[in-house]
Amino acid sequence: MITVQEYLSEKGCEEDLARLICLIAEQAGPIRRAFISNQRYAASLNTSGEVQAEMDTWSDRHLTQQLAASGLVSRIASEEQDEVFECNASFGKYSVVMDPLDGSSLIAVNLAVGTIVGIYEGCSVLRKGKEMKAALYLLYGPMTTLTLSIGSGVALFSLDDDGRYLLMEDTIRMPEGTIYGSGGERPKWTKKHASFIAALEAEGAKSRYSGSFVADFHQILKYGGLYAYPAALGKPDGKLRLVFEAQPIGFLAREAGGRISNGSTDILEIMPEKVHQKTPIYVGSRGIIERLEALQE
Ligand SMILES: O=P(O)(O)OC[C@H]1O[C@](O)(COP(=O)(O)O)[C@@H](O)[C@@H]1O
Ligand SMILES: [Mg+2]
Ligand SMILES: [Mg+2]
């Protein structure tokens, strides 16, 4: 099995981008080791108004320090920071968008959580998702895995005991699948969302929803199906963020032959206006997303 460094070199990945990807992937070790002493909630709220878990702020600080020290990054947009962090605005080749710890509500119950990262060339963090140079997520499950795309398909790596990420699967293709996970409170689902989920269930779809976007999406990437965090009555933009969650995950979904939509439009075509803006998310098998977008309101 080849390492992530060898994979990136074989794909002809630009050297500094490869260095940045490996630097980020290497932070899985320190982040995993930090869980045992960061089990509680901090006394602070993030810009989305969510109580921050200690692991949210720990991971955010740690990743920001590593990225700023690398000399490769000009700006960072983080779910856990109000403002865009200016690193080396004049030197850094790349800008990073990140959800340092995704699935925070599951930390206290030891379920799989992750880190989501998108990388753009240049110094702007408000870009269309399709312009991403790389997207990745780390998944802290029974194994620590890195799911990565640099625009030539999606590859999966597992971290071994020697700290190497070994290639487990290359060019992952998302099948048309029959599992779905939907966030939000069912009584507050819109009629369109509720009837779409009911149609999937009538066709035998099974619900798989843990409360961790990264873990729930990883199942969809492998088995096919649908992950949704929809608009709800009183919450027209849903819960998840366009820049830190939807764009990187959507880039990976599309690279695997899947699609991501806000219910009517390809999210990778949307130009963000604000760093912390939210969006309804439907991500999964191409056929399912195309069926959804063909539905009338
Ligand atoms: O608890 P809910 O409302 O089901 O929301 C779960 C969703 O919220 C999230 O935890 C939000 O992400 P963060 O944990 O990074 O804030 C997603 O990972 C998950 O899909
Ligand atoms: Mg998240
Ligand atoms: Mg988070």
Image: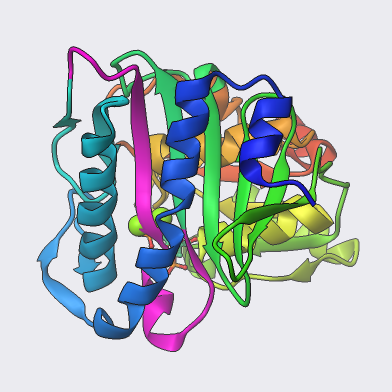
Ligand 2 occupies quarter: bottom left
Residue, x 76% and y 37% (percent of image)?
Answer: 256
Tell whether 179 sits left or right of 269. right
Tell whether 244 sits left or right of 253. left
Tell whether 203 sits left or right of 85. right
Q: Is residue 263 visible?
A: no
Image x and y of residue 193, in percent = 62, 51
Front residue of 261 and 91: 91
Q: Is residue 28 above or below residue 94?
A: below
Tell whether 270 sits left or right of 206. left
Q: Is residue 99 magenta?
A: yes
Image x and y of residue 26, in percent = 45, 53
Front residue of 77 and 142: 142
Image x and y of residue 122, in percent = 35, 13
Q: Is residue 217 above or below residue 286?
A: below
* Quadrant for the C terminus in the image: top right
Q: Is residue 19 magenta?
A: no
Residue, x 18% and y 12% (percent of image)?
Answer: 90
Q: Quadrant of residue 107?
A: bottom left
Q: Is residue 283 above or below residue 223?
A: above
Q: Quadrant of residue 283?
A: top right
Image x and y of residue 171, in percent = 81, 38
Front residue of 238 and 21: 21
Q: Is residue 171 above or below residue 101?
A: above
Q: Farthest residue in the left direction?
A: 43
Color style of the picture: rainbow
Q: Is residue 146 visible?
A: yes
| Number of numbered discs visible in the structure rendering | 0
Residue, x 71% and y 50% (percent of image)?
Answer: 156
In the image, which residues are magenta? Answer: 89-114
Q: Quadrant of residue 124?
A: top left
